[in-house]
Amino acid sequence: MTTPSRLPDRSARRWPLSRIIGAAVLVISVFSVVAMAAGGLALGRLDQQRGRVENIIDPAALDAQALDSALLNQETGLRGYALSGQQDFLAPYTDGLAAEQSTITTLRTLATALPAPSAANLETVIQQAHTWRIRYAEPLIKQVAASGKPVVSPDILAGKAYFDALRARLAAFQADVSAARAQTLHELNDASDTLQVVLIVIAVVLAAIVVLLAVALRRSAIRPLYRLAGSARRVADGDFGHEVVASGPREVDQLAADVNRMRGRILAELTALHEANEALTAHATDLQRSNAELEQFAYVASHDLQEPLRKVTSFCQLLQRRYAGQLDERADQYIEFAVDGAKRMQVLINDLLAFSRVGRSAAGETGPVSCAAALAAAQANLENQLTQSGATVTAGPLPVVSAQLPLMTAVFQNLLGNAIKFRGEAPPRVSVTAAQDGTSWLFAVSDNGIGISAEYAERIFVIFQRLHDRATYPGTGIGLAMCRKIIEYFGGRIWLDTDTDTDTDTAAEGAGAVFRFTLPVLPEYPSLRSQPELPQVQESHG
């Protein structure tokens, strides 16, 4: 198994996940800046060429056309005025002159942004127009105005030559504007194509970067996490010997190291648990063997020892009856001791056999048992003792519990028998009550007898433990031990209540004793019952 100290040294050389993600974000950010710069440049060039066409070339072409129209209006008006001599025909000339001045002002501003020959050609057009007006138009207007009649001057051919030269200069300027517009449109198309290429390249490169980053993140972060998760699931499924190895970001390596430490801890705990289980199994085997030996002893006691013990008892009783009074007093005493010992041995063997059979009887299946019925059976079994002692037994409503009727009868019979046996000067008075305490029934059996000191509260439940001599209070000391074994077998507990404040009125009349025990509540029998059916009388134990 890899030692935990090696993993942090190895993981320290790896990039943490935050740095990997930061590097990916940095790459995308740098590309975004470059893409925005390239796209901005291409878009700026496109906007520049579009603005040149819309704001310079097209207005210059329109103004050149307007200038041509203004010059034509001047020439037409001048010719009509010369042929008619009427002042109204001179209006197109006047309007054309005003339009020319306005158009020339605009064209001079636009011509500075046109190619170099365009501005020079515009100035040539302006100069040529000025020459036509000075040398032909204005003298003709003065001549017609002076005579008031139409004038047919031989200078008309010269004026036509001047105007043709002017139109030629204007045509050259318009050609410059058209050429500039064609060139600008070509550059505009190139800028548009460049922008499209830049956008396509950005899209392709962005897709490539995303794919590369996705592959890199998958290989450097996601795939190690998948491998780590698979190893963790394998360990979780029970393969604690599988070493968790991860090759990825620092956090994944550290997590793998933590999982390995946890796996090692669990493996150590499991090893200790397996060793404990093996020891427990060995102890269980020994316990089974001991139980088997105990069962064998119970069998021997119930069969093999009973017969010779009955013979000893019978012959001792025969000796007692036949030779009573024929021997000396000491011999009669010895025979009495032998008979009494044999009888007590027989009772002890029977009680021990009954104690060992608790929970092992043929009718070992538990079921609903009326505690009132069990108490009635115990009273029936102790009828002679109750009558002779003048004892009275009072009982409140008692529940139905999951138990065995013979064993519950034995519990009540032993508790009632103790109340009769350890009575005081007054006739025994026994009270049996029950009340629900959460998920359990709490029983109380109280009497007005001699009572039991609190220091013996646990000792009285130990098998064969007695607090009094056999001459005063006969018995084997097994009754309360059997009660505890039966109650615990049915899922409850029994104890001597040493708190006199909780004693019943019956117990308060004498020193008394109060025994309490619990049994689980049956969901199908949640209430107390007071009218039981009397069962058959059961055999007394203890």
Image (cartoon, rainbow, N blue to C red):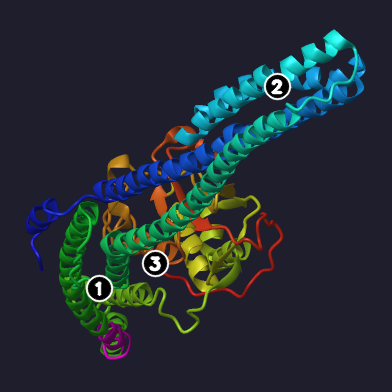
Of residues 137 and 203, which is closer to you in this image? 137
Question: Of all residues shown, which one is farthest toward the front?
Answer: 154
First in sequence: mark 1 or mark 2?
A: 2
Left or right of 99, for residue 421: left
The kind of secondary structure the magenta stretch mainly shows is helix
Q: Is residue 399 magenta?
A: no
Q: Residue at x 32, y 72 (%)?
A: 237
Q: Residue 542's mark?
A: 3
Residue mark closest to the camera, 1 vs 2: 2
Q: Quadrant of residue 342?
A: bottom left
Left or right of 6, for residue 340: right
Q: Secondary structure at mark 3?
A: loop
Within-10-Å neighbours for mark 1: few <14, some 14–19, many 20+: few
Q: Secondary structure at mark 1?
A: helix
* Vertical relation: 80 (above or below) 233: above
Q: Is residue 296 magenta?
A: yes
Relative image position of residue 82 (x, y in whole percent):
84, 22
Left or right of 438, for residue 268: left
Amino acid type at image mark 3: Gly
First in sequence: mark 3 or mark 2?
A: 2
Q: Quadrant of residue 398?
A: bottom right
Q: Residue 341's mark?
A: 1
